[in-house]
Image (spheres, rainbow, N blue to C red):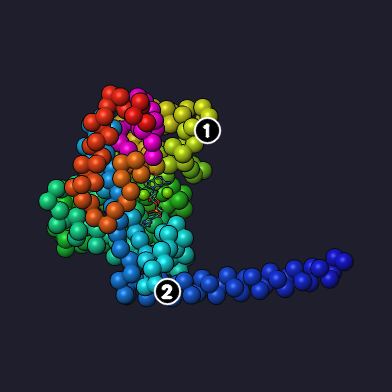
Amino acid sequence: RAKASLGTDVCFYEEEMDEAVRNRRRMAQQMREALDQGQFSLNWQLQAAVDTGDITGYEVLLRWIQPDGTFISPADFIPLAEENGLILPIGEWVLRTACAEAASWTEPHKIAVNLSPVQLGHVDLPRLVHQVLVETGLSPSRLELEITETAMITDMERTTHVLRQLKLLGVSIAMDDFGTGYSSLSTLRAFPFDKIKLDRSFMSELDGGPQSAAIIRAVLALGESLHIPVLAEGVETLEQLAFLRDQGCDEVQGYLLGRPQKTAEAEVQAAARVLWAVDPSMEKAA
Ligand code: C2E
Ligand code: MG
Ligand code: MG
Ligand code: MG
């Protein structure tokens, strides 16, 4: 029995592998075309101060819509782009396009651009960022770069060196998805981040029991003693917002305030302000 079925299993396995390899090749080819043919675009999601409701900035999120209208999530194509190196030209396109667009705004809001660990490890990033800032005329103080812990653990020494060089340009650095990795705490020790972005999983599990609330409080206390502002990601309800406000969280981002949008419009900002206008009955409104 063992031999026969093992044979078929291996055969199925190989077929599936071939299929997976073919799919990845096809997707890589499609990504190259997407970049050439302008299928990538940017979305903007606002970030707001918890105490006032003022807009503090916009996170830039990459979108890929294929010619037939198919939407492919960055969570699906970025890992592949990181493997085959396409993240380098794609990431450069994101940075340049986002800075150019933000430089044309009437309101000088900050923008937050996501950086892949691959970009940190494979390009002369400080030079690229400097070049893009000069080219677009965006003030460095308006640019925040978000990095995840993965970038830090692959080569901590090199990464902190690059981050220090970036800071010398006048840009700020945020730690993204905080709390999801293996070494979030030692990452904070290695580099003086300008912001901690608490991963949205803590927000979504806030109703599920006391654990998430305790962890959020602990991270807020940590941020306070390290003098690093904390932004909570994935805020979807007024209860979550009220909880964060009571706990002294600095900034929020999430569907409650605004979905990622094609443009960073004034109407979106106005909508966010409405939430704070209902205060102090914010909890009741929910
Ligand atoms: P991220 O940097 O943590 O971005 C936040 C993600 O959470 C975005 O997903 C956003 O749409 C989503 N989000 C925001 N508010 C809420 C909410 O209230 N509820 C829920 N459920 N989700 C919310 P998105 O746009 O699908 O991006 C996924 C990830 O892809 C990003 O996570 C980031 O790691 C990566 N990514 C996106 N754009 C870029 C880029 O230009 N370069 C790189 N390297 N990575 C990018
Ligand atoms: Mg991010
Ligand atoms: Mg995040
Ligand atoms: Mg994330």
The residue singled out by tag 1 in the image is 208
Of residues 188 and 97, the one drawn nearer to the viewer in this rendering? 97
- The span picked out in magenta is 236-252
Q: Residue at x 19, y 55 (%)?
A: 102
Q: Which mark is residue 30?
A: 2
Q: Is residue 124 visible?
A: no
Q: Which residue is at the front of the view, 127 or 249?
A: 249
Q: Is residue 11 above or below residue 225?
A: below
Viewer-side label of 1, 2: 1
Estimate the spatial distance between the alpha carbons at disc 1 and disc 2, rounded to whole Å. Answer: 40 Å
**Residue 125 screen position, x and y as percent:** 30, 59
| Quarter the C terminus occupies | top left
Disc 2 residue type (three-letter): Gln
Image spot of residue 143 (x, y percent): 23, 50
Residue 116 seen by the camera: yes
Residue 158 drawn in magenta: no
Check the picture and name the quadrant holding the N terminus. bottom right
